[in-house]
Image: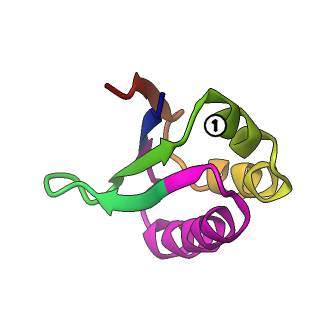
Amino acid sequence: MTIGVIATLTVADGKNAEFEAAFTALADAVRADEPGNLFYSLFQTSDDAQQYKVLECYSDEAALAAHRDTPHFIAAGGKLAELLAAPPHIEVLKGV
């Protein structure tokens, strides 16, 4: 069963460009090094320039767990956290 994730991230004022660059590097690594990842993209919300949504899809729960343990995700997590104005909100969804 596929697993979807929607992560809502609120970026600190003035940090958008730095956040987007750091996320792009992470997304490139996810796509290159995680065969269980089916989709990993960043979107900026249309009504709040500081809010972003990460849409993710994995082949199964094991692929999602593997994603969380990758060196590139762990390293990016610290960098991205420094750029956020609030803790991320993470929704995990089961494919149907």
Which segment did they paint magenta?
A: 9-38
Determine the residue positioned at 32% across, 60% down. Answer: 43
Q: Please name the colour scheme applied to the rendered image.
A: rainbow
Determine the residue positioned at 22% across, 53% down. Answer: 48
Determine the residue positioned at 49% across, 36% down. Answer: 86
Amino acid of disc 1: Leu
Q: Main secondary structure of the magenta part?
A: helix
Residue extending farthest left:
47
Left/right of residue 71 with respect to residue 2 in the rendered view: right
Between 1 and 76, the one nearer to me in the picture = 1
Question: Quick check: 52 above or below 28?
Answer: above
Between 57 and 51, the one nearer to me in the picture = 57
Q: Is residue 65 magenta?
A: no
Residue 58 location, x and y as percent? 53, 43
Question: Quick check: 46 above or below 7?
Answer: below
Q: In this figure, which residue is indicated by the disc labeled 1?
A: 64
Q: Determine the secondary structure under disc 1.
A: helix
Residue 56 location, x and y as percent? 46, 47
Residue 38 location, x and y as percent? 49, 54
